[in-house]
Each structure stands twice: as structure tokens, then as C-alpha cells.
Image (spheres, rainbow, N blue to C red):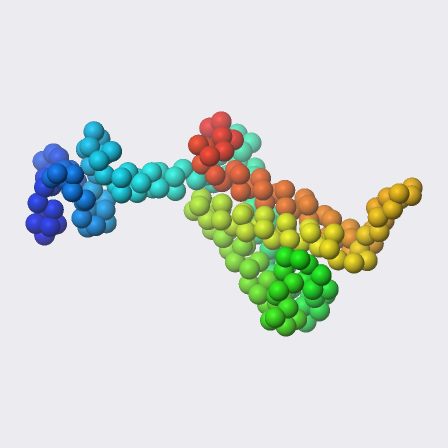
Amino acid sequence: MGAIRRQLPHCWHSKPGVSRLVCRARNQEKIPIIALKIGIRTEGRKEAQFPVVRQAMEKDIMIKDFNVSEKGHGSYWLLGILRWVMVLIFVSFGIQKFTPQSADGIALYISNSPFVSWLSIFGIRGEAYLLGIIELTTAALLAAGAFIPILSALGSLMGVGTFAITWSFFFSTPGVVKWSISADPIAWNLTGEFLYKDVVLLCVCIVLFLASLPNKAVPLRSN
């Protein structure tokens, strides 16, 4: 602490026996970086003089304000069921991407997609491996999000992106659906049915993402 005080000559202990320093910059000088690293707080009325400190404190508050559904009250914790269902789905789909059958099966969807057709530069097996890694990473983030709220938001957001793209395959892949003005306006095959249901998984990830955000961003929680 003595070394810190020598580097911060304008700092002193706020109270005897309290290992926290209160700093005041002379002539509104910038606070040394070391002050930020050790978490020194400025006096409340002086805080506005130090925008770097204020921004750091606001960022810290935002990170702490992220939510975990399993820690909610009432029926809110039931969203945790959706989390672990999505973890199971992403693990299952991710593992499948490392099999030749799955790699060949998704090649048609990827090649016709306006969003991920560029993955073909990695080859049929390479694009499948990359998607598998992304899906397994998403599963890991969602699982860790049960304990670290910001990871819950990140994993959910990755899930939103994943299923937004896969649901778009329903519209971009030729042959899965035939549009007409007949008695059967949307005639899809089994592949079309498989792709269309991703809209449900997309909505689940959206719910998990919004539920993970701070209340000041999305006021969903009542607790």
C-alpha cells in the first residue's frame, strides 16, 4: 500500500483501518492507471470530474446487472428449463456436424443460403466442422450462463443468430416448399417441416437473451 501511495500522492485513507483510498486530482489531472486497477473510488461529488472512472463504474454496474433465470423468483426460474433444453439441442447438433452424413446433408442448405454460402471455401467437411464448433461453443456458453449471467446473454445471442440463419434455409433452399394460390398454399416436404420448426427454437433463444439483460435495458423482471 505504501508503494501505491507514493505513486498516488494525492490519495489518503478515507477512514482508519479501511483499505480503500480516496483520491482527488490536483487541477483536475487524470487519475493514474494504477488507480483504476486497484478499484479506487473517487468522492461522490468529485466523480463527474473523472469520466474514465465514471465510465468504468457504469460498465461494472451493467455487467453485474445481467440476470440468471435460475435465480429468479416465482415462475421466472422456469426459464432455466429452456436453457438446459437448448444446451442439449446444441450439443446434439454440434456433435453431428463432425460426421460425414451430417456434413453431406447440410451442404445443400449452405450452398443456397445468401448468409453462409461463403462457408463453402472450407469444403463440405470443413464448413460442417466450423458449424459444429460454433454450436458446441454456444452450448458451453449457455451452460456457463447458469452461473455467469453475461455468458447467458452471449450464448443466447449466438443461439438467436444460429436459428435465424437455419430458419432462413426454409426460404432459400430449393424444393423444400412450393408456394401456390391453390387449396394448399404452402406445400412443404419433410425437409421443409424440419426447417420450419426452427422458428420455435429461435423464439426460445430470443426469450433467454431478453431475460438475461439488465432490467434497465429490458424491464421484464418484477423481482
Residue 148 image position (x, y, % from top left): 43, 47
Name the residue furthest right: 183
Residue at 24%, 33% in the rendered image? 48
Q: Is residue 11 left or right of residue 200?
A: left
Residue at 22%, 35% in the rendered image? 49
Q: Nearer the viewer, residue 27 or 106?
A: 27
Residue 208: image quadrant is: top right
- Evaluate whether residue 71 shows in this view: no
Residue 50 image position (x, y, % from top left): 23, 39
Task: Count all numbered tags in the image, as a single digit.
Answer: 0
Residue at 79%, 58% in the rendered image? 174
Residue 120 image position (x, y, % from top left): 64, 68
Residue 22 image position (x, y, % from top left): 15, 38
Q: Is residue 159 left or right of residue 27?
A: right
- Evaluate whether residue 138 shows in this view: yes
Q: Is residue 2 left or right of residue 60?
A: left
Residue 83: image quadrant is: top right
Q: Is residue 68 left or right of residue 36?
A: right
Q: Is residue 98 above or below residue 21?
A: below
Residue at 57%, 65% in the rendered image? 130
Name the residue furthest top: 222
